[in-house]
Image (cartoon, rainbow, N blue to C red):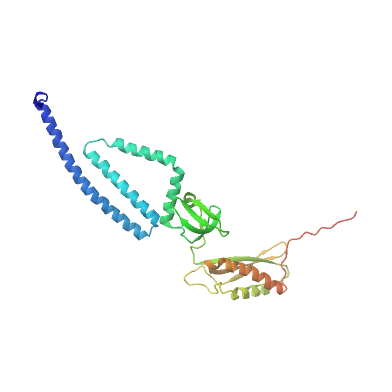
Amino acid sequence: MLEKFLSPDTYALIGQWALSFCKSLIIAIVVFIVGRWLIKWINKLFIKMLERSKVEESLYTFLTSVVSVLLWLVLAVILVSIFGIETSSFIALFASAGMAIGMALSGTLQNFAGGVMILIFKPYKVGDYIEAQGYAGTVKEIQIFNTIIRTPDAQTVIIPNGGLSTGTIKNYSKELYRRVDTEFHFAYGTDLEEVKQAIGEIQQACPQIVQQPVPDSPVVAAPWIGLKQLGESGVLVTTRSWCKSTDYWTVFFYMNETVYQQLKARGFMFPFNRMDVKIVDK
């Protein structure tokens, strides 16, 4: 019946198209099988890399999903190109969609990128005491978009990861030891050697203060006392005491309270600013 409507040349064209389509289909099937195997192999390799890097669980799941989706998209574009379909339009569409989404979610993506960087490079971890973005506290949770800290007065602060990844962070828990600096004013005429001896005895009596240099930590030294400044109303004596990072505040308050109580009891004078007003009767 079709012979009345189709010429021999048309039959030849249909046969060529069918043969070409079958060849493309066979190639596409082979590429799909090989591509699926490669995707599984790449995913396994990527998972092993994440396991060796000890990436956080929340980031681990997200990254594996993103890599898998991207690989399948690449495979889909390759399969479409095998059948002779122009792929530049698909690529342009994906690029336009990605640009639009990126512009709409620029702040969110910045926080997400910051969260990824924090979870990978780990400038701090849960339990560390940090200071950043004008806040200081203990890290309670590290999320993809935010970091949650608890301040010493029991306030919960949620800080976007974008600012944390690009700003300055003080991590007070990163090092095992920390130096405690304290300063005390004494009146002019005070015997400096007696002051140093009295404060030295207080430092030696504190069990949290390291008394000798630590070989594993070159910066950790024995307690030190020195004259820092000659002020307007007295001399300024400074002390340096090393201790475990967890004992910082214990040593800080111990030094201030004990030095004040014991040296005052020994008769040392702590000066204060004052103004003398003289009234002249004309």
Quarter of the image that includes the N terminus: top left
Q: Residue at x 22, y 46 (%)?
A: 32
Q: Residue lying farthest right?
A: 282
Q: Residue at x 24, y 39 (%)?
A: 80
Above or below, 192 relative to 29: below
Above or below, 226 relative to 157: below
Q: Residue at x 48, y 54 (%)?
A: 147
- Res 209 → quadrant: bottom right
**Residue 41: in sight, yes or no?**
yes
Q: Is residue 131 left or right of residue 108?
A: right
Give the camera-side residue of 153 and 22: 153
Above or below, 230 relative to 35: below
- Res 3 → quadrant: top left
Q: Position of residue 65 (x, y in %)?
A: 34, 50
Q: Position of residue 217 (x, y in %)?
A: 48, 69
Q: Position of residue 203 (x, y in %)?
A: 60, 73
